[in-house]
Amino acid sequence: MKKCMLILLLCAAQLSILNPQFSILKAQCPVQNTAFQDGERLDYKLFFNWKFIWKTAGSATLTTRKSTYQGRSVYQSDLITRTSGRIDRWFCMRDTLRAIVSDDIVPLYYHKASNEGGKNRFNRITYNYQGGKTQTHQFYRSPKGNITEVDNQVVGCAYDMLSMMLHARSYNPNQFAVGQRIPFQYVDNANLKTETLIYRGIRQFTTEDEHPITYRCLVFSYVEKNEKGKEKDVVTFYITDDLNHIPVRLDLFLRFGIAKAYLQKATGLRNAQTSIVKQK
């Protein structure tokens, strides 16, 4: 379930990498926000499959609001994830993530406080900008209480998981190629990792609730290599094919089963939901 929520944030991040006119590694940091606004809230329900039986695993809420930070106008985005019921007895997760970005979506601050399976971690990143370079200071406290502090300086932009998602949502993915492979990097827990996404094409997804909604979605797979170098799908996710670019479904393939996250409710959206094909 931990990786499920990391992918929930990644699933919008590939938009910026796929756009032929934009690269995360080379872009100018400021970007015009066209995707979200003050008061947006996305609610998700988490499910887990155990021996062909689907069980409710918990919930996640992603909110964005206007705020101030060091005397300037900013957006503050918070992701709160909670397992519940029987899942808590098997693997309890209580995660809180926060990102603060400028009005033109330049990262300023990030932290993640997590309790996953009884292991507590804390990660904090602060950003400074000078001479076309991004300076980051990372503070990480491991479950054993060990503290790591790392300073980095890169030309161009650097992102944590949450600010990358906010930044990428404002790009228009109009030249996708089915099967295209997209390498990307992200920083978390004082680490810099390189992963791979594959674009699968456009599909429709219908929610399974009392008032089902059918969305037109951009579909991606996040893949990893095992010890033998063989590649496998870790998660498949569905993003609305409209200006909001919100994730509505995630399928996570685990060693011991399958986890899913479904959008339950979206309020305060900035743009019309033109990706809705059918609604009852």
Image (spheres, rainbow, N blue to C red):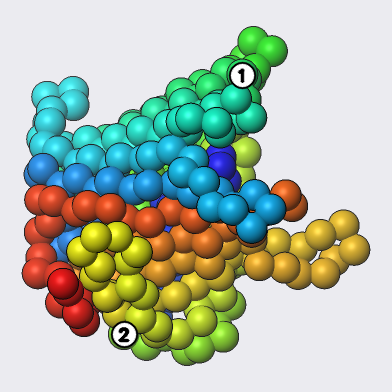
> Can residue 116 be seen in this snapshot?
no
Q: Quadrant of the C terminus?
A: bottom left
Could you say where residue 158 lies in the image, as x and y percent from the top left?
Answer: 44, 48
Could you say where residue 172 lies in the image, as x and y percent from the top left?
Answer: 27, 76
> Can residue 36 be seen in this snapshot?
yes
Give above or below for 234 relative to 217: above
Residue plotted at (27% across, 75% down): 214
Residue plotted at (64% across, 58% down): 52
Q: Quadrant of residue 179?
A: bottom right
According to the image, label 2 marks what residue?
A: 174
Could you say where residue 123 lies in the image, as x and y percent from the top left?
Answer: 50, 26
Could you say where residue 174 lies in the image, as x and y percent from the top left?
Answer: 31, 85
Q: How many marks?
A: 2
Q: Quadrant of residue 39?
A: top left
Marks 2 and 1, the one that precedes in the sequence: 1
- The numbered mark at residue 118 is 1
Amino acid type at image mark 1: Gly
Mark 2–mark 1 distance (CA, rounded to whole Å): 43 Å
Q: Is residue 35 left or right of residue 180?
A: left
Q: In the orientation shown, which residue stands out farthest toward the top?
A: 145
Residue plotted at (60% across, 25% down): 89
